[in-house]
Image: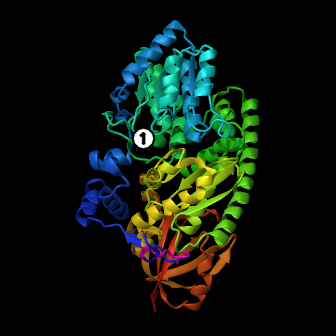
Amino acid sequence: MTLKSRKKFQKQVERPYRWRIRPVDHNLAHLLATDNKLNPVVARIVAGRMQEAEFGSAMMSESIERFLSPRLADLLDPFQLADMEKAVERVVDALRRDEPITVYGDYDSDGTTATALMVHLFRFLGHDVRYYIPHRIEEGYGLNTEAVEELARRGTRVIVTVDNGITAVAEAAHAKRRGVDLVITDHHRPGRELPEAYAIVNPNRADCPYPFKFLSGVGVAFKFAHALLKAMHVAPDKGRAFLRSVFDLVAIGTVADIVPLVGENRIFVTHALRWMRETPNLRVNVMCSVWGIDPATLTTQTISFRIAPRLNAAGRTDHAGVCVELLTTGDVRRAEQIASNLDSFNDARRDLEANILRRCQRFVEKEIDLEDEPILVVHGDDWHIGVLGIVASRLTDAYCRPAIVLSRQDDYAHGSGRSPESFNLHEALAATSDLLLEWGGHAHAAGLRLHAKEIHRFRTAINEYAHRHLEPEELVPELTIDAEISPREFGIPLLDALASLEPYGEGNPHPVLSMSHLRLIEEPRVVGSNHLKLRLSRDGEVFDAIGFGLGMLLERLRQQRYDLLEAAFSPTSDDFTGRRKAVMELKDLRFMGG
């Protein structure tokens, strides 16, 4: 590819976003509103999403009633998962023979909650199970041969993995040589070759008939627990009570792992949040108390921004085993001590992240031609690898393009990458894998390792790939609008009606609405940390609006204060004065002229 043929990418993305108005079948919306007694705006939102990927199979294959009112009775039979019967039979035999079992987890929130769930399960069944969490820095992700060898030496006869193992071909072979039966429970996509394990339970196996493919690692662990309780002939009422007791773990791991909140995931999270609010258990009470959270107000956002970062922080800056201890201990004082330590780890993580992010931004300014390099490949010496993924995500948000952050350590470079929805990073790494020693992950989040001397060649190769597969306009962030509404449709009744779509998360985002022909009725101002505050009106109705981080629009608003505006926003409530009021949480503004 010659230089002249290369695409030129913007140095920086200018506002506004590319607005995409979701197409709505208004006949379907009318039917939904009539047959299901839905608010008309909610009906239009649901009708639009039914035709697109957000609700996926959950909306296309099941009734609206099931989506709006998720039922525990609709959870699928765990034995539909390939190898589940075989996996459970081996563990039942180990329990009856009192063979040593080790649960092998992962250091992120999904992995630690899955490990904790398994620990609770085996304790409930009267077995003194062991667990092992690899050290992120010293061992890296997933099974490793040295750990398998050490566990075998200590007498482990069965290893049950959670949230990892699907690509552990060499490690599975070593376990077999050592006489250890490996039962893999995972949700990540398999590689070209499946490990030679005793059993592999993963809905994303090509030969797995399980209809719901979006379970998290802890979700698969829950299905294993359900199956094992059945196989052990635990009384149904006791089994249900146990499964309910670990639902909070399933919700935390599911939300933290950003899997789609549809189907079974929606059932898990909906019921878990209600129980966490109404009857919080010891671990939920301690986390909320120490981290300043009101259990009565727990939402998916609370998990995403308050709980998951603290659970993840231990694996990034220390060792994630303490998270499993927090989630399994019955000692309140010990739980409070660990929760306090996790708060400190999170502060340390933020400091590390901010420092490396500043260095990355300087690297971009000095070393990268943003018009010619659609993928940021940034590197430095001895950066803490525990925060590279977060920093890559920050760079992707800031520059609206894929970002890969590499830390050089001696002769090797370890890294993490993130990308916008418009670009498949996993495929890009596959295309350049001849330059990589290790790599893996998802379409928009991946990890990699390569020789440090190959960084320049890798940077060139992956950007050449991007020039062939990425159009410049795809890096302009897209904002999807669910529905346009009129002034009379906005208010407290709409907020109450939208509650039927909760919980929000990946695959079921908080609705974004639009309203056109708005006028400023007060001088716009910036408050707090660059937040835009406006009062708008149309047809005699007045609307308060807040745009977090949108202070850069202030000057243009002042210059064009008499122009009509179109606002994209999510409806939210303001209870600050003690009187509930509907407010527009702005996502973007467009000028329509006078």
Residue at screen point 44% across, 26% down: 224
Asked whether 570 falls inside the magenta stretch, the response is no
Magenta span of residues? 5-14
Q: How many neighbours does mark 1 have within 10 angstroms: few (below 14), some (14-19), or many (20 or more)?
A: some
Disc tally is 1
Residue 407 visible at all:
yes
Q: Is residue 141 above or below residue 544?
A: above
Please state which of residues 576 and 214 is positioned toward the viewer in this rendering. 214
Residue at screen point 46% across, 43% down: 270
Question: Is residue 295 shown left or right of residue 342?
Answer: left
User: Which amino acid, by three-letter code, is at mark 1?
Assistant: Arg
Please state which of residues 453 and 166 is positioned toward the viewer in this rendering. 453
Residue 390 visible at all:
no
| Residue 517 percent location from the top left of the image | 43, 83
| Residue 476 percent location from the top left of the image | 47, 71
Q: Is residue 263 above or below residue 501?
A: above
Question: Is residue 94 shown left or right of residue 343?
Answer: left
| Residue 67 percent location from the top left of the image | 36, 47
Instruction: Tell me the SS state at disc 1.
Output: loop
Please state which of residues 453 and 273 is positioned toward the viewer in this rendering. 453
Please state which of residues 339 and 391 is positioned toward the viewer in this rendering. 391
In the rendered image, the quadrant that contains the N terminus is bottom left
| Residue 451 percent location from the top left of the image | 60, 48
- Magenta span: chief secondary structure: loop
Q: How is the image coloured?
A: rainbow
Q: Is residue 242 above or below residue 25?
A: above
Q: Is residue 220 above or below residue 546?
A: above
Q: Which residue is mark 1?
A: 189
Residue 485 image-quadrant placement = bottom left
Asked whether 9 falls inside the magenta stretch, the response is yes
